[in-house]
Structure formats: C-alpha cells, structure tokens
Image: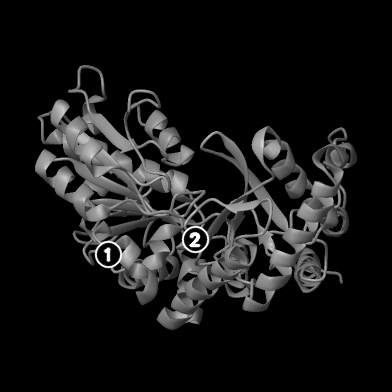
C-alpha cells in the first residue's frame, strides 16, 4: 500500500485482523507494562520514521500489551465491548476531523448529536426537556451535572458561583451513600465541595442508601444541598430506593443527582426497569455509553433536567465564536470542553443499529448470563456468592476464615494466568472478592456455563494447594 492515505488503509487492515482474532485468543495481555515500556522507551527520533512503519509497529507490537476488553469473557471493571458499529462510526469521526463545538463548525455532527440526545432521553425514559452533554464518561458526567447542581442550589440562596466563585458562598451540603463510586468523590473534589466534607449516609448489606438516615441527616443540615443517589453499585449492582430518597430531597429543597454509570440502562428493559422506579424524579443523571451501549471509549452523558442550569455552568463565549441563535442546542454549552471530538456520532450509530429492542435484548442477555453463572456457583463448597444478582454484577469469595483474601486472589490470578477469562478483584465490606461484570457486547448465553466451570476448576486447583 502506497500513497498519502496508505497509513489509513494499513490501520484498517490491522484493526480488522485484531478484532477477528480476539475471541480465540487468551483473555489476557501477552506482555506487561514493563515489557511494553522497554520496547517503546527510546530517545525522540531526530528524523521521523515513515508513517507506515509507525502504524505497522503499533499493530504488530502494541497489540501484545493490550487487554482484550472486547473479548466475550472479559469481566473486569464494567467496561463494555466497543461494538463494531460504534467503532466504525468512531473511525469516521477521526477521519472527518471535526470539532463538535458549534453548528457552524460542523453542521452534520451537531445535527447527529441533537438526534442522539433525543433518542437517549427516549430509551432511558427521562424528562424529554432535559439536556444531554456528550462527555468522556461517567466521571466527567458526574462532574458536569454536579456543576449545574452547584450553580442552581446556590443561586436559590442569592449566590452565583459560576460568576463569583466559592469564596464567601453559603456552604453546600452534599449527601451520598457510604458505598458511592469513587468517581463521584473525584467530581466533588474537582468542584470544590471536597472529598471529605460530604455527609455519608448509611447503607445496607448490598450498598443501598438508607432513606431513614438520609432523612435524619438532611433535617440536621438546612440550607443549600445536593443528594447523590446510585443506580448500580459497582460491586453488587444494587440500586438505591429512589422514591423515598426523592421525597426527602424534595422536602429538603435539595437537588437530586443519580450516578447511573451502567445501572441507568436497566430502564431500557421492562423486566429491570422496576429497579429504577423513582429515579426519573431526579434533577440530573450521569451514565456511560461505553458500558452498556457498547460505544468505543470515551463516551458518557451528563443529563440535566434544567437545560439553563447546565448551560450557565458550562457555557463559553468569545467574540470569535459563532453567535448563538435563541433556542439552539449548542454542543459546547453542555460540556466543559470547547475543542472535542464528535462523540455523539458513535452514540447515534449504536442507537440506530440496535434500536429499542436491541438495547433491551442486550441488557436482558447480560443479566441472564450473570444469573446463570451465579446459580451454578451457589452452594459449591468453599464458594460464596455475596450479592443479590439482580443485574449484571457478581461478587464471589473463596475459602473460609482468615485465608479467604489470599484464596480469592489466587483464584483470580489463576484464571488470568490461564487466559480462560478476565475477572477483577475488589474490596467489599473489608473482604477481598472476585468481581464479574457481564457487560461486553460479545458475551453470549453459551458463555455462562464454561465460565462457571472455569471458575470451579481454578478454585479446585487453588484449594488443592492450600
């Protein structure tokens, strides 16, 4: 291949080869970080290599240090599998080279993002007047939505933090469950609320917020406030009880935000929608596209009921930028970036290719796989399923007594070494557990029993050595 676009042709061929061989490959990286760094850590070239040589090396060598996240038996970190349609749309995005900030900078991209916004609100059944900011993921989604919350609650008390900052502002109390995801705490830190200044609410054995403790604590702290609930606890998959939480937030005059990185997609299927009942009463939500919608990284959404609050927090203006026409949806007014890639295009492509039924079927399939694996392992000697498998998450513990942490880690490592599947480890209730997150597009119902058998075999091997 020669010519000015040879690198694109080569990259396309190599990408296809990688994805075609993924399912039959071990579910682990062939080389670790130190090995990959040793290969690439060279002095900056004085004269550049040919573009084809660079792409060829990346395709042939870099793949050895890639974690196979689109593998059907990759169950780490609740990631999703970058489905081919979304990847193809993202290739177009890169090739088009569009800045998705304004209508005038890219009419097509702005139009597709507008439609994708409407489709997301439809399939998630959230208020149709809400605004959707297309961000990198749920961490920035939480940050963006909570920036809107910060401005809204303080303006109710006569203070505009977006113009006047936080010095001398009335203090804002933030209430969230004791098992909230770490990305929420990061977002609060970015916004000046602080990671330690929050009011942590008691949770039950599955990580669900206790509404009675929320009611007690909000009553003790009048003034501007934000309540953060959770749809899908990262370990157990549990959902907070949204109806009583929404009642308490409304009575307290608090902004209710929902971190729904993956759990918000439960609303796409009637059998799982009940888990989210009352969630629609919130003022804002954050959710990932690169999880259950299977878009490529990076893709997430900040959804805010009050469009004006989000635009006030995120809006940007300068004389050289296009003048806004009243009522226009301006992409850069809904996110904390002026220059950004056209993230709405893969979202549009995935929603159009899957349709309402395709998304619902995928949610049901993954939840069914999780349930089937958990059922097979329940009651097996030395194996404990620690959560109610209501969604797609399973947490397991192996052994008994003081040696459980070590035994559990050994099972995780054995599975990774064998390459049969990739499982994550996590700390839950002071115990080290194996965490399985069934959310990859490629995972099929027929994977469930082989996965369970692989786990049983790894545990048998570890137990024999204890």
Secondary structure at numbered mark 1: loop
| Residue 169 badge | none
What colour scheme was applied to this rendering of the protein? Answer: one colour
Residue 2 screen position, x and y as percent: 86, 69
Residue for point 28% across, 53% down:
241
Q: Is residue 110 at least partly visible in the picture?
A: no
For this rendering, which residue is in front, 29 or 20?
A: 29
- Please identify the residue farthest to the top as the structure is shown: 168
Q: Position of residue 402 (x, y in %)?
A: 67, 32
Identify residue for label 1. Answer: 126
Query: Which label sits in the foreground, 1 or 2?
Result: 2
Q: Relative to residue 383, is residue 73 depicted above or below?
A: below
Q: Nearer the viewer, residue 291 or 322?
A: 291
On the picture, is 460 further left or further right than 344? right
- For image coordinates 20% across by 57% down, the residue present is 281
C-alpha separation, residue under disc 1 versus residue under disc 2: 25 Å
Q: Residue at x 34, y 63 (%)?
A: 275
Instruction: Check whether the beta carbons of the residues at disc 1 and disc 2 lie within 8 A of each other.
Output: no
For label 2, the crowd category at 10 Å Cα-Cα, with few meaning under 14, some 14 to 19 and many 20 or more, is many
Whether residue 112 is visible: yes
Rendered image quadrant of residue 176: top left
Q: Position of residue 359 (x, y in %)?
A: 46, 75
Q: Residues within 10 Å of mark 1 (few under 14, many from 20)?
A: many
Instruction: Name the spot of residue 66 as percent of width and height, x first.
Output: 77, 53
> Residue 329 falls in which quadrant of the image?
bottom left
How many discs mark residues in the rendered view? 2
Disc 2: which residue: 389
Which one is in front, 443 or 388? 388
Q: Quadrant of the C terminus?
A: top right
Q: Is residue 173 above or below residue 125?
A: above
């Amino acid at each position: 291949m020669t010519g000015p676009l040879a690198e694109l042709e080569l990259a396309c061929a190599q990408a296809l080869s990688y994805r075609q061989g993924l399912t039959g490959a071990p579910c682990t990286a062939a080389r670790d970080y130190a090995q990959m760094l040793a290969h690439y850590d060279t002095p900056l070239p004085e004269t550049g290599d040919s573009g084809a040589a660079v792409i060829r090396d990346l395709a042939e060598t870099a793949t050895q240090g890639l974690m196979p996240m689109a593998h059907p038996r990759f169950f780490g970190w609740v990631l999703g599998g970058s489905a081919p349609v979304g990847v193809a749309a993202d290739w177009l995005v890169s090739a088009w080279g569009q800045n998705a900030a304004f209508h005038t900078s890219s009419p097509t991209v702005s139009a597709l993002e507008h439609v994708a916004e409407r489709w997301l609100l439809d399939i998630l059944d959230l208020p149709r007047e809400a605004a959707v900011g297309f961000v990198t993921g749920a961490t920035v989604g939480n940050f963006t939505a909570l920036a809107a919350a910060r401005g809204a609650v303080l303006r109710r008390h006569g203070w505009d933090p977006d113009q006047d900052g936080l010095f001398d502002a009335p203090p804002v109390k933030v209430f969230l469950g004791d098992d909230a995801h770490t990305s929420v705490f990061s977002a609060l830190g970015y916004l000046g609320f602080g990671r330690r200044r929050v009011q942590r609410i008691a949770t039950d054995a599955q990580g669900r917020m206790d509404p009675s403790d929320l009611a007690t604590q909000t009553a003790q702290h009048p003034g501007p406030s934000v309540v953060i609930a959770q749809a899908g606890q990262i370990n157990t998959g549990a959902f907070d009880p949204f109806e009583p939480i929404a009642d308490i937030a409304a009575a307290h005059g608090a902004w209710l935000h929902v971190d729904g990185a993956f759990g918000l997609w439960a609303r796409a299927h009637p059998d799982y929608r009940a888990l989210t009942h009352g969630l629609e009463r919130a003022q804002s939500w954050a959710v990932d596209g690169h999880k259950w919608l299977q878009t490529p990284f990076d893709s997430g959404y900040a959804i805010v009921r009050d469009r004006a609050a989000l635009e006030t927090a995120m809006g940007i203006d300068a004389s050289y930028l296009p003048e806004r026409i009243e009522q226009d949806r301006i992409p850069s007014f809904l996110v904390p970036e002026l220059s950004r890639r056209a993230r709405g295009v893969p979202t549009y492509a995935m929603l159009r290719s899957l349709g309402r039924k395709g998304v619902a079927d995928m949610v049901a399939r993954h939840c069914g796989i999780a349930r089937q694996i958990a059922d097979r392992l329940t009651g097996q000697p030395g194996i404990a399923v620690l959560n109610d498998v209501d969604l797609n998450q399973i947490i397991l513990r192996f052994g008994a007594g003081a040696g459980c942490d070590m035994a559990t880690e050994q099972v995780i490592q054995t599975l990774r070494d064998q390459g049969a599947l990739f499982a994550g480890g996590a700390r839950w209730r002071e115990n080290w557990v194996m965490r399985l997150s069934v959310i990859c597009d490629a995972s099929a119902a027929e994977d469930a029993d082989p996965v369970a058998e692989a786990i049983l075999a790894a545990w048998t091997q570890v137990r024999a050595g204890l």
